[in-house]
Image (tube, grey):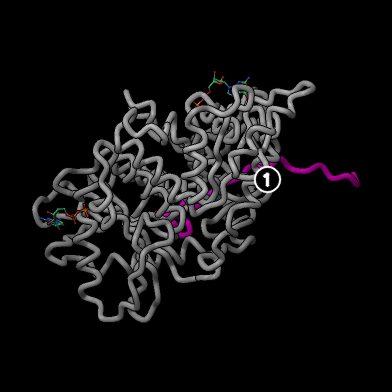
Amino acid sequence: MKVAVVGYPNAGKSTLVNRLAGVREAVTHEQPGATRDRKEIETEWNGRRITLIDTGGVDLAAPDSLSRSVQDQAREAIADADVILHVVDARAGLGPGDAEIASMLRAAPAPVLVVANKMDGGPGKEHLLAELHSLGLGEPFPVSATHGLGTGDLLDRIVELAPPPEEDAEADDRPRIAILGRPNVGKSSLLNALLGSQRTIVSAEAGTTRDAIDTELTWEGRELVLIDTAGIRRRSKIAGTVDYYAQLRAERAASRSDVAILLCDASVGITSEDLRIGDLAMKSGCATLVGLNKWDIVELDLDDAKARLRQRLRQRPPVITCSAEQGRNLEKLLPKALELADRRASRLRTSELNRFLADAVAKNPPPAKRGRRLRTYYVAQVEEAPPRFAIQVNDRQLINRDWAYYLENALREAWGLDGVPLILDFVPRQRSRAA
Ligand code: GDP
Ligand code: GDP
């Protein structure tokens, strides 16, 4: 769900956004020298993911004071939002631009909430709210961003106002495969090649988020949805912000996909930007497959590239070399992606998992600290897609990163889970009350 935060400069938008996001700030973007650019922060409230879009000090009412592109971004944020917060400094009262902002927001497609900020407490402040009614946007919602007063209630209200989460995507069990990659690696070429050889395309419709095109297709009898982030970029290019938007789009596409085909340009090699996208795919819970594209124009040292990917991407994605232009190896990509989708959704038997754990512990004993050794008692898979495991231990303090990674990779190796993100929770063993 997207929440656009607009208002006159100094109303306390940034303070409020930071407060609403708590410490769970995931995506921030601040272009140097462009503090008025929009900034997005992800947070979660009652199980809903919320993207707070801080439009900075955008004064929508003063067309000449800011560059068009900044204004366009604010409008884009508003057009895109599920809920809009109009933040007003309630102590200062309405500013010169507030009425104009409000009149623009009355035409906005999403519900608008007037947030009366800087209501820091103390008696007799109610009169401050009265004036804000005149904006014609309903009951103002009092908060104090700096003191955190009313912000939990505000989040409740936002969730109430937002449209219910899309059930369709949940009910739809077709594997969703995103094609991700830096600009120019060949994503559009790949998509065209894949679709060109297909006569079974059901429909191509714009994705709900307008960040990507979702294409339904049937591949060897199996229905799937391809999520493509390539096509849109060219249409809505905003100078200087391409990388940022590309990154955001990749992130959103990954968050609603099961598998990411991370396309890389073999003529350039594996770049840090490629790795970053691979990382975000994993963090979104996507299984990852690397397509080393443009294999026709250069023969990169494949072992080298594979080693780098294995070393740098924790999910250890399988690698397929291909050429979108020459159609080489493309027939392997989707079957591999479907295989990864299945493995990501798999459920491992508890008995086998526990045999595996005993084995893994025997092969590489867990770490010890000050004479105390980590003991593992029991493991079970608690979730799938992506797989999540709970491992009972005597003392979580004794775990170190190396051993946790060792276990994760051993798990991957034992069940062919290369490319699949795995979540391992180490939980302290509960003492038996009966004893
Ligand atoms: P923005 O320009 O709308 O993003 O505003 P900022 O978040 O930068 O805040 C502007 C100023 O108002 C800063 O000095 C904040 O510390 C202050 N401020 C923000 N929220 C509150 C609040 O709830 N109470 C008080 N007293 N000051 C606040
Ligand atoms: P996107 O930005 O990731 O969608 O990349 P495009 O599909 O637009 O491709 C960028 C450029 O790379 C274009 O000039 C393509 O013709 C070229 N390209 C794409 N795939 C291949 C390939 O497999 N081999 C070669 N030699 N060029 C390719």
> Is 425 inside the magenta-drawn segment?
yes
Residue at position x 43%, y 44% in the image: 77
Q: Position of residue 87 (x, y in %)?
A: 56, 34
Residue 372 vertical position relative to residue 331 in the rendered view, above or below: above
Magenta region = 410-435
Tell me the crowding category of disc 1: few under 14, some 14 to 19, or many 20 or more residues within 10 angstroms, Cα based.
Answer: few
Residue 344 vertical position relative to residue 110 in the rendered view, above or below: below
Q: Position of residue 178 (x, y in %)?
A: 36, 59
Residue 424 vertical position relative to residue 325 in the rendered view, above or below: above
- In the picture, measured across the screen, residue 272 lies left or right of residue 415, that is left
* Location of residue 347 (image quadrant): bottom right
Q: Nearer the viewer, residue 158 or 338?
A: 158
Q: Position of residue 335 (x, y in %)?
A: 33, 69
Ligand 2 image-quadrant field: bottom left
Q: Nearer the viewer, residue 182 or 238?
A: 238
Residue that mark 1 sits on: 156
- Give the position of the C terminus as an image quadrant: top right
- In the picture, measured across the screen, residue 375 lies left or right of residue 246, that is right
> Is 40 inside the magenta-drawn segment?
no
Residue at position x 51%, y 29% in the image: 14
* Location of residue 113 (image quadrant): top right
Q: Residue furthest left?
A: 297
Q: What's the residue type where badge 1 is placed?
A: Asp
Asked whether residue 311 appears in the rendered view, the answer is no
Residue at position x 30%, y 38% in the image: 69
Q: Position of residue 245 (x, y in %)?
A: 33, 44
Asked whether residue 104 appears in the rendered view, the answer is yes
Q: Secondary structure at mark 1?
A: helix
